Amino acid sequence: MKVILKNIKSRKQLQNCPLCHLDYNGYGALATHIRITHKLKFKNVLVEYNIWPKCKNCNKPTSRLSTCSCSQKCATEFDNKNNREKRICIICKAQFETSKNSTRKLCNIKCNGKYLSLILKGKKLNLTKEQKEHRSKNVTGKNNPFYGKKHSQKTINNITEKIIQQKICNGQWYSIGKNEKQLLDLEEQKIGFSILRQHQVGRFVVDGYCKELNRVIEVYENFHNKQIQKDLNREIKICDRLNCEFHIIWDNDTF
């Protein structure tokens, strides 16, 4: 046996039992009444809502009032059928499909990255003086979310490491001594192993590093006599990181 409840507007309104026509305050009380008095399981009670809209795709009643669709699948299907248009990517000029309501101008993540890089370089951003002043006010002083804060030492080290790594990859690291190459070539002949030149160790770059011997080789010029403590601190940090030997070759302009 199945019972049909008609003209239901909300779950909390006064409910009328279709069998004995008694009024009950809400679904819970009505469910208990039907289960105990009429000995009927509440899953056999069918509810017809008179104000809920129908799904745009399959015409079934739905409670999703914002999208008017019974499921995400129906919403996607309806969108694909009726609400799509073709656009041209502003970077690669390729054609792509998107929703009519979307503000999308790029076809994929790659083009998005290229567009952002162009903006950062200032090629796509033609701002007036007023706009520039407005933007600068939002990121300077107390308006900046990072105002009054400081990076931790760990964060500073990570940033420095990445900058150094990028400079080495781009060939922008030029801290090479006058006779450094010749001295390291001679050292290679002595030890019989190859030496890696301009090798990065954390946020430091050493002149040479031998993997086989786990040895750091530094070529010091005369100006290092004026910064003994600084060089000593640097040596300690490098040795702690690699647990290696630290070998110094003094360049006395012999070449």
Image (tube, rainbow, N blue to C red):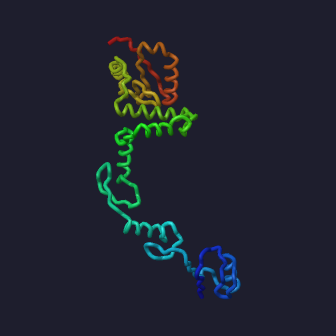
- Residue at 39% across, 25% down: 208
- Is the residue 22 above or below the residue 105 in the image? below
- Tell me how many marks there are: 0
Q: Position of residue 61 (x, y in %)?
A: 51, 76
Where is residue 151 shown, x and y percent of the image? 54, 34
Residue 239 at what x, y percent from top left?
Answer: 50, 26
Residue situated furthest front in the rendering: 130
Q: Residue at x 36, y 29 (%)?
A: 172
Snapshot quadrant of residue 184: top left
**Residue 132: percent from left, percent from top:** 43, 38
Whether residue 44 is visible, yes or no, is no
Image quadrant in which you'd find residue 199? top left
Against 44, is 222 above or below?
Answer: above
Left or right side of 197 for 29: right
Residue in view at x 49 percent, y 71 percent: 70
Is residue 174 or residue 200 the one in the foreground? 174
In the image, what residue occupies the spot 37% across and 68% down? 82
Q: Quadrant of the C terminus?
A: top left
Q: In the displayed structure, does residue 4 sit left or right of residue 128? A: right
Whether residue 178 is visible, yes or no, is yes
Residue 181's place in the image compared with 99, above or below, is above
Q: Quadrant of the N terminus?
A: bottom right
